[in-house]
Image (cartoon, rainbow, N blue to C red):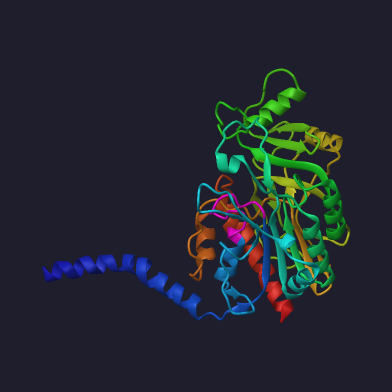
Amino acid sequence: MGQELKVFISKLWPLLVVLFVIPALSFGIWWISPDQSLDVLILDKTVPRTNYREHSGIFWALDYDKFIKTNGEEYFKEKDYLGFFPSEDKKENGTIDDFSTLDPKDLDQLASGADLIYVADTYGVYERDFTGGENEIEINEKIYGGLSQTDIDFLTLAKEKEKTIIAEYNTMASPTPKSIRTQFEMLMGLKWTGWIARFFDELDPVKNGDLPQWLIQNYLSQNPGEWAFWGPGLVFIHESGEIQIMKYDEDFNNETPLIRTPRFNKLGYDLPEVVPYPDWFDIVLIEREYEVISYFDIGVTSQGLERLRAMGLPRFFPAAVVKNNGDGKMFYFSGDFSDMRGNLGSAKFKGLPFLYRGLYVPSNYRDRQSFFWNYYLPLTRQLLANTYQEKN
């Protein structure tokens, strides 16, 4: 029996190393790594549920690289942000805690103390988020959302104090009033074309139950007849309500929109050259001061290019851009990058990003976590590291 046990253990030890020794070493390396002090202020108005999906990615990055507040406290995604806070009680929707509760003196103090401001999402929360209604045609009343004048006042102070500001998709679109949007565009030095877009790998509603019914109904109201689309397609929606649908193999050739990052970019960002991106993005025009980190390429055909021109759009769209802001920088992400579906697990293990980049192949556009590990996390970690270095 003793000999058999030795043979069994000899065969089992590689598994024990993988399951226990390597994770223990990984956690130990993370534990002894030094903390880094950085004050990050996050605004997220789209938090209907306690999964915090619109800002969980940035908090994972903060935890992984051991960024803490100047006062020595750790960051927690459940409380260390401004915006909407969902209630654990199903009878209540939640509470609001944002810049509107602060007077000008407090706003100035908050802007002075922040090293980096991240506007994750301002779309907001709506009645159907809590009632669970399934009729997408019904009016969905807003409970809270959109950029406010106080938000603009704070961002203006942050820009004047040369802080690093990051904003992304839907910061200035609906339900933000046009007057507020105009101020945001002037503040950031960019302009929204009014168009947003998304790729769907199947436009046949029979085969794709996730295809929004409001999309089909609104398109048919503009184009009477039958819904004659199937297979992959790109949907473009204008703020006026106009809908344009581009077909795969007719208007574009890429299997999904691609985010391209030049391999030898002068900005020094270490990112994959090509990453598929199948989610929502807006199309913006940028000032000359901006440098393009990455751009969207949908692989348009000659027919597709003509259709883009008819919509007043260029062939390529900015995906991530940056410009200097004195001692800080200003970034804009045109995609819904921070939206993280699924559980990322603990960040307290060194080497996890390297492991997951190997497991989640960039070409698998259907897996949202693949985009997180291959593009969003590397980019965010570099932005945080650069901000920390500039601060010190």
Placement of the C terminus among the 4 image quadrants: bottom right
Among the 4 quarters of the image, the one containing residue 41: bottom right
Q: Position of residue 84 (x, y in %)?
A: 63, 55
Magenta stretch, main secondary structure class = loop
Which residue is at the front of the view, 186 or 128?
128
Which residue is at the front of the view, 253 or 314?
314
Which residue is at the front of the view, 333 or 15?
333
Q: Relative to 26, is 8 on the left or the right?
A: left
Residue at x 81% of width, y 49% of height: 284
Considering every residue shown, the one lying at the far top of the view is 225
Q: Is residue 339 above or below residue 267?
A: above
Q: Position of residue 218 (x, y in %)?
A: 72, 28
Magenta extent: 45-57
- Determine if residue 199 is in view: yes
Placement of the N terminus among the 4 image quadrants: bottom left
Q: Is residue 47 above or below residue 80?
A: above
Q: Relative to 209, is 104 on the left or the right?
A: right
- Determine if residue 292 is in view: no
Q: Position of residue 133 (x, y in %)?
A: 57, 35
Residue 176 in magenta? no
Which residue is at the front of the view, 244 or 221?
221
Q: Position of residue 257 (x, y in %)?
A: 68, 44
Among the 4 quarters of the image, the one containing residue 6: bottom left
Residue 55 in magenta? yes
Residue at x 69% of width, y 32% of height: 249
Among the 4 quarters of the image, the one containing residue 252: top right
Q: How many marks?
A: 0
Q: Relative to 67, is 22 on the left or the right?
A: left
Residue at x 72% of width, y 27% of height: 219
